Amino acid sequence: MKIMIRRSPDAGLSIYVPKKDLEEPIVESEYETLWGGWIKVANGWVLDLPEMASDTRLPITINAKKRGENGDVP
């Protein structure tokens, strides 16, 4: 699914999903740099992010993979 990740002064990191017109803050991440691990957003979704350089600039639109309905986080 295509998502945009951006940083805002109020909410910190958040995602925007254009097809669903949904914006949610990122509440947890596997890695501090985000890339190559999973993130959890406020609505409970867990998304796997692609490998990218740690200094990748935001905002950025990427393809993320949504985990199953239970959103298992290791």
Image (cartoon, rainbow, N blue to C red):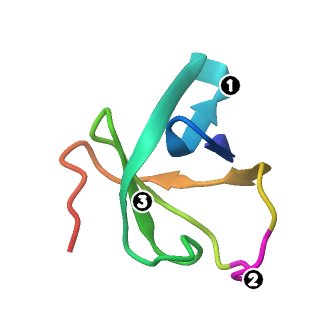
Please tell me whether residue 6 is drawn above or below residue 28 in the rendered image: above
Residue found at the far top of this picture = 21
- To which residue does mark 2 refer? 53
Please tell me whether residue 63 is drawn above or below residue 2 in the rendered image: below
Which is the main secondary structure of the residues drawn in magenta? loop
- First reached walking from the N terminus: tag 3 or tag 1: 1
Horizontal and vertical percent position of residue 20: 57, 19
- To which residue does mark 1 refer? 18
Q: Which residues are magenta?
A: 52-56
Q: Is residue 19 left or right of residue 37?
A: right
The amino acid type found where label 2 is placed reads Ala
Instruction: Determine the secondary structure under disc 2.
Output: loop
Residue 39, label in figure = 3
Where the N terminus falls, by quadrant?
Answer: top right
Q: Quadrant of residue 31?
A: bottom left
The amino acid type found where label 1 is placed reads Pro
